[in-house]
Image: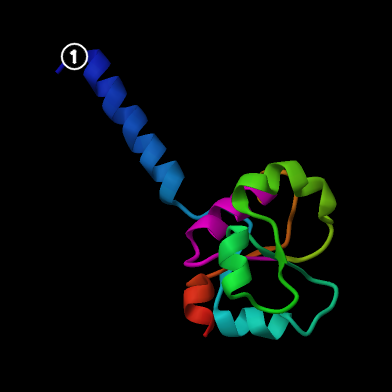
Amino acid sequence: MSIFSWLIIILLVIFIINRFTPTKGVNNITVQEAKDKLKDKQIQLIDVRTPGEYKTNHAKRFKNIPLAALPKKINELDKGKETVVICQSGMRSARAAKILKKQGFNQIYNVKGGMNAWY
């Protein structure tokens, strides 16, 4: 195998590891832990599903900011507050949590299982 082929394989492995390892500083929580956090009025609750998904079924107090719109609306959020992020299954919210972390948010919680596990 040539050096170029090895380089491609190494880059691919690094990409896969970065894509699927949890983001440092993002805590995965259960639905029950998220429900317990609903009681605290100081916590930001963000649902990153599409408006259609949100309209069909959502938990109270969660603000709908679709994942695609999050980078543009990030200035509407308070970096100093705890932030709980949810989606349908936990995948989009994990990506949203990563975006928030890169923008300086420190207390981020991703709901494992998302709305699929909520009800």
Q: Is residue 84 left or right of residue 1?
A: right
In the image, what residue occupies the spot 61% across and 46% down?
A: 68
- Residue 41 in view, yes or no: yes
Q: Is residue 91 magenta?
A: yes
Give percent across and percent down for residue 77.
Answer: 81, 55
User: Total label count?
Assistant: 1
Give percent across and percent down for residue 47.
Answer: 65, 64
Quadrant in the picture for the N terminus = top left
In the image, what residue occupies the spot 57% across and 72% down?
A: 56
Q: Where are the magenta residues, as a range?
A: 84-100
Q: Is residue 53 magenta?
A: no
In which quarter of the view is residue 35 placed?
Answer: bottom right
Amino acid bearing label 1 = Ser
Instruction: Provide the secondary structure element on which disc 1 rests.
Output: loop
Q: Is residue 19 left or right of residue 109?
A: left
Which residue is under mark 1? 2
Give percent across and percent down for residue 119.
Answer: 52, 85
Q: State the residue in front, 110 or 118.
A: 118
In the image, what residue occupies the spot 79% across and 71% down?
A: 43
Give percent across and percent down for residue 73.
Answer: 76, 47
Colouring scheme applied when the structure was drawn: rainbow
In the image, what residue occupies the spot 56% across and 80% down?
A: 31
